[in-house]
Amino acid sequence: MIRSADPQGRVERLVERYRRARDRRGAWEAHWRDCYDYALPQREVLFGAEPGGKRTDRLFDGTAPDAVDQLAASLLAELTPPWTRWFGFEGGPGLSEEERSAIAPLLEETAEVVRVHFDRSTLAVELHQCFLDLVTVGTAALLFEEAPPGRPTAFRFQAVPLPELVVEEGSGGRLDVIFRRSGLTLAGLRERFPAATVPDDVLTRAEAAPETRFGVLEAVVPEGAAYIYTAILLGAESDAGAALGDVAAALPGGLRPLAEATFASSPFIVFRWLKAPGEAYGRGPVMKALPDIKTANKIVELVLKNASISVTGIWQADDDGVLNPATIRLVPGTIIPKAVGSAGLTPLEAPGRFDVSQIVLTDLRARIRHALLADRLSQIDSPRMTATEVLERSAQMARILGATYGRLQSELLTPLVLRAVGILRRRGEIPDLRIDGRLVDLQYRSPLARQQAREDAQATLMWLGAVAGLGEGGAQAVDAAAVARWLGRALGVPADLIVAEQEAEAPVVEEMPDAPA
């Protein structure tokens, strides 16, 4: 809900805190530019470049951009695949087996409602943009808002550009304090903050120039178990100022609070690939491979220059009054005059050969693809790969992405699902369930999360096969119905397909026909 604005002193303290945090972020910006230039050039517009302009003039090798696209798409397919329920709700350890069986259909229905809202929203599109940033610079942010009533979905998502984002890490290691500096037109202000009062000077300036953008600073600061959201109008600015997040250009227009709200969970979900101790921003695989990426790019540039020299050649000629080197064009069919007895136009031998460059370039490209996991996340090329090989490949990826997946589960997936449940519960579309891990537990069912469940199921099936070889005595140690129910839960079988324990144990009573008189 919207509160009255804070006193001017609180607003100024928030802006000053943002300034200090932005100054600390300055050490990262040059590194981010290099990563975007060589691995994701289309993002360069975020740093003030002209939209739609050419941003590949410095890029000669496409290995890194191609690997970044593959890794981002693979993360989306492995963690949050569209049109698939990559999460589920189960009865927690605080419930008995009978209570878990009784509540299972309700939890399945609740998870399905959440999934339908996810699929109707733009989650897959915006999350893919976040994964591109995550792979390239190691930090990404997703804005998760509640959509207005009457929309097909209750969720509204937006990938937040990294140059607009400034974060602070809390004592628990989480990115709790979030600042976002953006530029909005008057129409954007009214759409984003419909209950806010727009100052008269903003209206006057917008009427004169409708394309004018006004700086808006959004701040999310934790306060106890809640999050205080504050939006501040900074004043009119240029498009470049909006992109670079420069508050000083907007200060003459005055600091005006737009709105304040209290949320149970932060609307900004910021997540990282990995991080170094003492650093708030993450580091991605492109940062690790950046030296190889730059070297490969330079080698391709030199190879292309050498190729142009090999095609056109380098020539020398005596200025004998007949041959004018300034007017010579080396094109097919050209007749070049020369004086009798002179050497004419003579080619120079190239000082070196670049045959070794292909060997070095092949090695560099292999290392780049290995660092960005493109050699292990790519499509299976061999049509004769056995099921065991496929499972082993999946297990290898689970080991490689284990640490990253653990961080993404904590910083992205869990906040995403919990905020979705909170919004739908408040709207009355799902029951009043609390995902507390004791009574109701959140389970992940994405392909990557299923790897451990598949290994457990495979071990259980191997045990059943060994027990079967022991004869009747071994079979007595197996509760077939309990094994079937456990395998169903481990493999993500819908709860309505599994017979509950009390139903399975209930005897079947058949009515006998009446005896004839």
Image: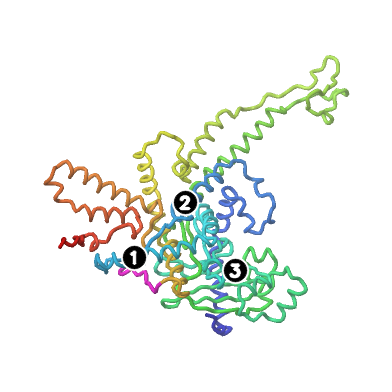
**Residue located beneath label 1 in the image:** 441
Residue 274 in the magenta stretch? The answer is no
Determine whether, in the image, residue 227 is placed left or right of residue 512. Answer: right
**Residue located beneath label 2 in the image:** 77
Residue 311: x, y in percent? 70, 28
* Nearest to viewer (mark 2 / mark 3): 2
Earlier in the chain: of badge 1 and badge 2, it is 2
Which one is nearer the viewer's eye here, 223 or 249? Answer: 223
Q: Among all residues in the image, which is located at the extreme top?
A: 341
Instruction: Report which quarter residue 193 is drawn in.
Output: bottom right
Distance between the Cα atoms at labels 2 and 3?
A: 31 Å
The kind of secondary structure element at disc 1 is strand
User: Magenta residues?
Assistant: 431-439
* Nearest to viewer (mark 1 / mark 3): 1
Determine whether 478 is above or below 210 in the image: above
The kind of secondary structure element at disc 2 is helix
Earlier in the chain: of badge 1 and badge 3, it is 3
Residue 257: x, y in percent? 60, 80
Q: Among all residues in the image, which is located at the extreme front?
A: 517
Which one is nearer the viewer's eye here, 234 or 211? Answer: 211
> As shown in the figure, which amino acid type bears the numbered disc 3?
Arg
Numbered mark located on residue 300 in the image: none
Q: Residues within 10 Å of mark 3 (few under 14, many from 20)?
A: many
The kind of secondary structure element at disc 3 is strand
> As shown in the figure, which amino acid type bears the numbered disc 2?
Ala
**Residue located beneath label 3 in the image:** 181
Determine whether 453 is above or below 162 in the image: above
- Residue at image position (53%, 61%) is 120
Residue 390: x, y in percent? 38, 41
